Structure formats: C-alpha cells, structure tokens
C-alpha cells in the first residue's frame, strides 16, 4: 500500500487513477509521495519515506527543488495540462487590454438609478472607452512552449500578425506552430515590432525582469503587455512608470502585487489561469499518472529535477538509483551487483545537470547486501528496489 499526502484539494479525476493500492489523505504519515497544487513546501519537513512530489500544474516555485534533489526526491510537474485554460484567459486579456471593457463595465454600474435616461447617458459617455481592434496588429509571443504555441496559433486565427521568440524551441513544438507565425532569434525583434507582447517563459535567473526599463524603451509607443506566466518576469515599477509616461497603454497580469493594484492602465486578474474544472482535472490526472509510474515502475517523465528515464519491465527485479553526475558511477553500481552474483539484463541511464538517474533490471532479485553495498558508493543518493 502506497501512502499519498495531498497538500491541497486534488481533483477526484486524478486520485481515482491511483487505484486500490493507494491511500491518499491530507494527513498521511510517512508518505511515499505528495500531490500538491499551490501550497508552499519550503518550510515543510521532508520525511525519509518521501520518494516523489507531483505538482498539479506547471510552476514549481512552491517546492524546495535543490533540497529535494539532494535527498533523492523526484519532483514532477504537469506541463501542458492547463495550457488551454491559460490560453483562453490570455485571449481574454488580449481583448480587454484594447477595448477598455473593464472600465466600461465599472462605469455602467454608476448609471444605476437614472431610469429612462440610462440609454442616452450610455450613448453620450461610451466614447471614453474607445479602443483598437486586434485584427491586423502584431502580437509578440515570448516563449513558445505549450501555452505560447496555443496563444500564437489562436492569435493567427483572430487575424493578427504573430512573431514568436524561443531560443529553446523543441522540434515537437516547432511542428505544432502555425506556418504563419514568424519565428525570430533576437528578442529585440519582439520588443521593436509588436503592438502587443505576451510572456510565456518560466521564471529563471535569465528571464527574471525580462520586461524592464531597457526593454520597454525599445518597444512601440502605446504597446500593450500581458503577463500570465510569473510576476517577477516584469519589473513592475518600470511598468508603472511607462504607463504614466504613455509608453505602455495597458498591462494585464494574473499576478497581484500591492504596487500594481488599483493602478490606472493595469488590469489584474486574481491568478485565474488554471482555474477551470477541466484544467484541474487534467493536471490531477497527469500528476497521479506520473507518481504511479514512478512508484510502481521507477519510470520518470516530466521531472524538473531529474532526467526522463523509462523502459519496459524485464527481469526479476528493478533497481532504481539516483546519483551524482560524476564519472564511473554506473560501473561502480555494476561492480557491486557482480560481487553479489547479480546479472544486469537491461539498463537505462540519463543525466540532468548535477544529477543522474539509472534503471537496471536484473536477472535475480537484488538482495539487501547488494543494496547496502551500492548505497556505500560515494556519490550515490538513493537506491530503491522494485520487485
């Protein structure tokens, strides 16, 4: 029986995929895995029993990644599971950044109580909410991952000219992009040519503050900026300053920070990107499948801390080894198995930065003596046997 701790309310659509050999609860003792959405785990004590954490969503800022890597805890996320939900909200943001719909709605509320005069008051006052159409305008998409591709393709369908930037564009993603999307290799091409800019990249030291005073200066006057990825991708003080000077017409974001709330020209949605029942179900299903495959088979897919490694089960038992990415680790593991008269039938190993993960299927069951010998090898982080 596997114990799964849930740190948030996880969709039943996901939990139901685990099966009868799993017990999931918010107070699980000695959990084998954790399913989490937005709850912060940075101050959480990580028990020795914990093998994996699955974030039902793409971002993993709420998880102590380095600490998990050091302890051999595999961290999964669910890229693409909420992509359509975010895409639809980005398209909403694109439209309300232009048409002053939000301001118009709020103004219309003030007309309450004027009886038959309301119609005339609307016709007289509506000109203050005039805004441009998006058809024929240029949208710059920074980041062509699961969400960025959907946004770019949808914008093409809405009649926009779309240019996209992504220095790490995968072959699979490139095949999904409309041929009408122009791929540029210089970020300045986005800044200089776009009427609208939308950001869809993860928050890293390289992307933090990518929208700042210097990049804004390169943009068209009256540009409209959308941020539905992470708050710190923009320097909010530079955004506010540019709005006050008329350089930016509108900034729409899903991330509320105190300095931008109730600021003219800024529209804040309260982190609604993945807030659809379909998205929550999709993320939970993917997270549950990732956890189950790792616990039962040792396979890793969509981990942000470890490389992707998977292979069909063969042999009597499966040895799963997390280790430092240093020379001679595989040969050292193989030597310890050989000393215990255990033959390797098949093997797969991959590395990701400082860490590596190896799966070895063996001809006979791996005994405790072999496991202890492997654990004693310098650079070994975690050893697990699946029978």
Image: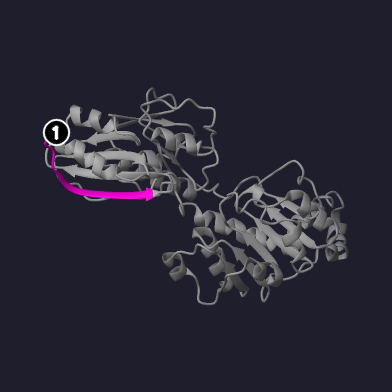
198 vs 31, left or right, is: right
Q: Split into 4 quadrants, where in the image is the N terminus?
A: top left
Q: What stretch is highlighted in magenta?
A: 340-351
User: Observer-nearest residue: 302 or 331?
Assistant: 331
User: Within 10 Å of the Cα at label 1, are there few (<14), some (14-19), or many (20+) other Cα atoms?
Assistant: some
Is 125 in front, or is 40?
40
Please state the horizontal and vertical placement of residue 188, each as a whole percent of the image: 67, 68
Q: In this view, does 352 lie above or below 222?
A: above
Q: Position of residue 310 (x, y in %)?
A: 29, 50
Who's the residue at 79% across and 46% down the image? 262
The residue that appears at 15% across and 35% down in the rendered structure is 339
Measured from the top left, where is residue 327 in percent x and y? 33, 46
Name which residue lies at 51% across and 36% down: 64
Q: Can residue 323 be seen in this view?
A: yes
Q: Which residue is drawn at 80% across and 49% down?
A: 263
Q: Locate residue 379 relative to residue 254 in the image: left or right.
A: left
- Disc 1 target residue: 340
The quarter in which the C terminus is drawn is: top left
- Residue 97 within the magenta-colored segment of the rendering: no
């Amino acid at each position: 029986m596997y114990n799964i701790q849930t740190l948030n309310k996880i969709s039943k659509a996901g939990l139901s995929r685990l099966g009868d050999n799993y017990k999931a609860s918010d107070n699980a003792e000695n959990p084998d895995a954790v399913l989490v959405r937005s709850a912060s785990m940075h101050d959480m004590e990580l028990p020795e029993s914990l093998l994996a954490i699955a974030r039902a969503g793409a971002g993993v800022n709420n998880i102590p990644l380095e600490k998990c890597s050091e302890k051999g805890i595999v961290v999964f996320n669910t890229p693409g599971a909420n992509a359509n939900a975010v895409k639809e909200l980005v398209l909403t943001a694109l439209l309300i950044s232009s048409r002053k719909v939000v301001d118009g709605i709020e103004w219309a509320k003030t007309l309450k109580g004027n009886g038959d005069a309301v119609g005339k008051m609307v016709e007289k006052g509506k000109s203050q909410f005039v805004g441009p159409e998006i058809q024929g305008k240029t949208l710059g998409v920074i980041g062509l991952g699961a969400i960025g591709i959907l946004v770019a393709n949808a914008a093409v369908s809405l009649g926009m000219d779309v240019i996209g930037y992504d220095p790490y564009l995968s072959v699979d993603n490139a095949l999904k992009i409309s041929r009408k999307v122009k791929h540029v290799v210089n970020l300045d091409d986005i800044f200089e040519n776009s009427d609208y800019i939308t950001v869809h990249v993860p928050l890293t030291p390289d992307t933090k503050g990518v929208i700042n005073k210097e990049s804004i200066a390169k943009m068209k006057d009256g540009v409209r900026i959308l941020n539905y990825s992470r708050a710190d991708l923009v320097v909010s003080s530079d955004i506010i300053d540019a709005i006050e000077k008329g350089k930016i017409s509108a900034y729409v974001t899903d991330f509320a920070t105190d300095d931008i709330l109730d600021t003219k020209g800024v529209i804040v949605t309260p982190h609604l990107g993945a807030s659809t029942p379909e998205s929550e179900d999709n993320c939970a299903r993917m997270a549950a499948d990732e956890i189950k495959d790792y616990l039962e088979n040792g396979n890793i897919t969509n981990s942000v801390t470890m490389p992707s490694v998977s292979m069909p089960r063969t042999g009597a038992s499966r040895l799963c080894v997390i280790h430092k990415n240093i020379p001679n680790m595989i040969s050292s593991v193989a030597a310890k198995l050989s000393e215990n008269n255990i033959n390797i039938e098949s093997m797969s190993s991959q590395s990701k930065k400082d860490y590596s993960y190896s799966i070895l299927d063996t001809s006979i069951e791996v005994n405790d003596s072999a496991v202890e010998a492997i654990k004693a090898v310098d650079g070994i982080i975690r050893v697990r046997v699946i029978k």
